[in-house]
């Protein structure tokens, strides 16, 4: 297999075909709203009677205000259609780096008006279908799930100049939970998630002879807090996340979203790391509570997006370090500025600590190029790998960026020079570090040489023994890993012996 990829390395179309057929595990860093295509959003908006401002390209519900027209008009107006696609994605964008950076983040506010709750099943179905067609078996999606209700409750309960410490935060947590609006928001989110999952099954024709490849893709969710809001708002969103996970099995973790360089993001960064550590510890110390995992966007920074002051540039020194040490992040999203971090004993020590602790990095090559102009040898991927930090490739916002996971693996081959064994390890790592319930299929974490004792005599792709089958049924992670390994065995056999 390794030889086959090397034979075709300089043939882009051949590499693309090879990588498309390769099983690629899971996508652990994907924002639901950014993962769907603008073309689909236009179709949904047209069907739902939504409107589009022809100057700002901000979508809204009908009836249309002055300066807006029905989105349905775009179906018969190619110029309008193309303009919406360009406004809602990076399609044909030709501006500067910072203009592109802003354009990307602004797009979420433009198309948000068409992503109403009744379209949640369409969104999940599209993400699953895309993943399945790209030979993945698992996706984790980040979204808010109505956590803003708890954010508002927290802002009412917490004063701006309050001193944050563990007793204070736990006291405010209890106050937020006592508000009747909190339980109502939890119930609404639970119903929405259940509807989106069952609805996606229906849309994909799961359980029928016409089943879409997405039916073989399992989905879990992370509740994402909006770091551009106040620290109290973020705290409330995280309180919501930990409680939602107690009643919705598909909620497996928390995260932070929105620009890391935003003024509030920078001002409250360490307070939010503290808050997350308090909630995480509270949850872990109660054996009756469902575990909630921690993934954090950190280090998605370059000097140009930060204030050009000594204080502003110092933000490059510690974000990943504090996410790992204070908030106990199990995974880091992006991690682009790691090699310049100065906190503690510096970057080399940071990477060594991450390797020792098993902190995985979600690598988003195209996103880092488009938004930060970090690519090729400037990207820290190879340095992470050299230090044995676990890494996996992810799409970030494939609909906005106009990519898919196959594109990212092809980029890893052509831009980063990765080999088939390295790609295979990355795919396995994505599932090994997925926030799935249960034990791993592998006997030793991140050592993909031996299966657990229950399956040691079994071979993926064949019918598992009774003992192995029982283990797979009891452990979601192992079950999905077995599915991936079975597909990998079939791919390698077919590629070697076409």
Image: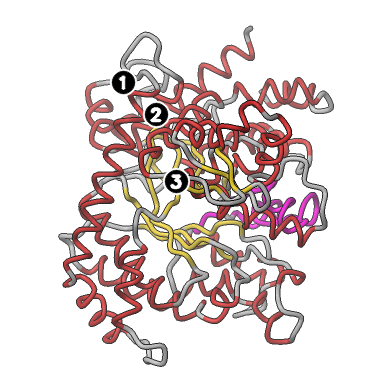
Q: Residue at x 72, y 40 (%)?
A: 91
Between discs 1 and 2, the one toward the N terminus: 1
- Tell me how far mark 1 sits from mark 2, CA to CA: 10 Å
Q: Which mark is residue 285?
A: none
Q: Which residues are magenta?
A: 359-388
Circle 1 SS class = loop
Please say whether residue 20 is visible from this viewpoint: yes
Residue 451, image x, y percentages? 39, 34
- Left or right position of 22 against 464: right
- Tell me how far mark 3 sits from mark 1, CA to CA: 30 Å
Q: Which mark is residue 464?
A: 1
Please say whether residue 29 is visible from this viewpoint: no
> 147 or 368, which is in the foreground?
147
Circle 3 SS class = strand
**Do residues under tags 3 and 1 come within 8 Å of each other at their CB atoms?**
no
Between discs 3 and 1, the one toward the N terminus: 3
Q: Residue at x 41, y 88 (%)?
A: 160
Q: Which mark is residue 141?
A: 3
Instruction: Please say if 331 is above or below 318.
Output: above
- Left or right position of 112 against 8: left
**Do residues under tags 1 and 2 come within 8 Å of each other at their CB atoms?**
yes
Classify the position of the C terminus by image quarter: top right
Circle 2 is placed at which residue position?
482
Classify the position of the N terminus by image quarter: top right
């Amino acid at each position: 297999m390794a030889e086959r990829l090397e034979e075709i390395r300089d043939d882009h179309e051949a590499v693309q075909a090879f990588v498309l057929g390769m099983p690629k595990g899971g996508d652990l860093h994907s924002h639901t709203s950014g993962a769907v295509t603008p073309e689909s959003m236009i179709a949904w908006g047209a069907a739902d009677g939504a409107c589009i401002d022809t100057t700002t390209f901000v979508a809204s519900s009908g009836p249309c205000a002055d300066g807006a027209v029905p989105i349905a008009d775009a179906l018969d107006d190619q110029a309008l259609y193309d303009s919406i696609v360009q406004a809602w994605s990076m399609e044909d964008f030709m501006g500067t780096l910072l203009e592109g950076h802003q354009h990307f983040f602004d797009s979420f506010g433009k198309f948000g008006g068409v992503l109403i709750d009744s379209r949640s099943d369409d969104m999940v179905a599209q993400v699953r279908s895309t993943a399945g067609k790209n030979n993945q078996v698992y996706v984790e999606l980040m979204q808010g799930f109505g956590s803003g209700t708890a954010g508002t409750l927290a802002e009412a309960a917490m004063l701006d100049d309050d001193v944050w410490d563990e007793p204070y935060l736990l006291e405010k947590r209890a106050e937020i939970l006592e508000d009747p609006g909190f339980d109502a928001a939890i119930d609404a989110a639970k119903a929405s998630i259940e509807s989106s999952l069952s609805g996606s099954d229906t849309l994909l024709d799961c359980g029928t002879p016409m089943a879409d490849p997405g039916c073989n893709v399992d989905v879990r969710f992370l509740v994402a807090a909006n770091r551009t809001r106040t620290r109290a708002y973020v705290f409330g969103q995280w309180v919501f996340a930990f409680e939602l996970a107690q009643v919705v099995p598909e909620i497996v973790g928390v995260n932070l979203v929105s620009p890391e360089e935003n003024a509030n993001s920078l001002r409250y960064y360490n307070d939010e790391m503290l808050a997350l550590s308090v909630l995480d510890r509270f949850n872990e110390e109660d054996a009756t509570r469902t575990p909630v995992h921690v993934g954090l966007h950190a280090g998605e920074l370059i000097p140009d997006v930060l204030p050009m002051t000594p204080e502003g540039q110092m933000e490059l020194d510690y974000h990943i370090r504090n996410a790992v040490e204070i908030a106990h992040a199990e995974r880091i999203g992006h991690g682009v500025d790691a090699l310049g971090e100065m906190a503690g004993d510096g970057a080399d020590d940071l990477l060594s600590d991450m390797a020792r602790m098993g902190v995985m990095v979600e690598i988003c090559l195209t996103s880092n190029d488009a938004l930060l102009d970090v690519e090729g040898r400037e990207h820290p991927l190879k340095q992470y790998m050299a230090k044995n930090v676990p890494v996996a490739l992810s799409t970030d916002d494939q609909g906005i960026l106009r990519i898919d996971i196959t594109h990212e693996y092809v980029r890893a081959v052509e831009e980063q020079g990765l080999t088939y064994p390295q790609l295979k390890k990355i795919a396995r790592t994505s599932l090994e570090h997925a926030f799935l319930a249960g034990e791993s299929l592998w006997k030793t974490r991140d050592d993909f040489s031996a299966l657990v004792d229950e399956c040691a005599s079994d071979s993926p792709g064949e019918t598992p023994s009774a003992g192995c089958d029982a283990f797979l049924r009891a452990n979601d992670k192992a079950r999905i890993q077995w599915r991936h390994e079975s597909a990998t065995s079939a791919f390698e056999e077919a590629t070697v012996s076409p």
